[in-house]
Image: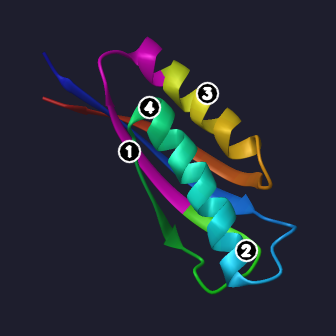
Amino acid sequence: MNLLVGVVDCELYIPGAQGLKEKRKVVRSIIDKMNKRFKVSALEIDLYSLHQSAQIGIAFVCKNENQYSIIVDSLREIAEGGAAIVTKWYPDLIEIS
């Protein structure tokens, strides 16, 4: 049986953030919701100094391609469900033998 790892590179635009503190609050909320629902590993990985932009890396293990698709779609809904707008969404499925 092969191990399937889902990864997503996500960029967000946060129009209401007037400073880094507000931006981090929005990003932390999104990451916390993702972790609470799916126990993914998610972290802000770039665009640290921009007040209204963030890049998040997300990784998770899944048992098949159907589960991968469900998780990726749900993660996007979480990312789009708050104060942020998804500007880039690059999901990928990695198969490890």
Question: In the image shown, does 18 or 60 lie closer to the viewer?
Answer: 18
**Residue 42 left/right relative to 29:** left
The quadrant in which the C terminus is found is top left
Give the residue drawn at x 77%, y 74%: 52
* Front position among marks 4 and 2: 2
The residue range painted magenta reads 56-68
Q: What is the three-letter code of the residue carrying label 3?
A: Asp
Query: Could you tell me how far apart the alpha carbons at marks 1 and 4 are, in whole angstroms?
Result: 10 Å
Sequence-earlier tag: 2 or 1: 2
Q: Position of residue 25 (x, y in %)?
A: 65, 66
The quadrant in which the N terminus is found is top left
Query: Could you tell me how far apart the alpha carbons at marks 3 and 2 are, in whole angstroms?
Result: 26 Å
Give the residue drawn at x 52%, y 41%: 34
**Residue 21 left/right relative to 4:** right
Task: Name the residue beneath numbered marker 1.
Answer: 59
**Callout 3 crowding tier (Cα within 10 Å): few <14, some 14–19, many ≥20:** few
Question: In the image shown, does 93 or 35 lie closer to the viewer?
Answer: 35
Is residue 60 magenta-colored? Answer: yes
* Front position among marks 1 and 4: 4
* Front position among marks 3 and 4: 4
Q: Is residue 41 above or below residue 63?
A: below
**Residue 75's quadrant in the figure?**
top right
Task: Name the residue beneath numbered marker 2.
Answer: 22
Q: What is the three-letter code of the residue carrying label 4?
A: Phe
Tag 4, which secondary structure? helix
Q: Is residue 49 above or below residue 59?
A: below
Query: Could you tell me how far apart the alpha carbons at marks 3 and 4 are, in whole angstroms?
Result: 12 Å
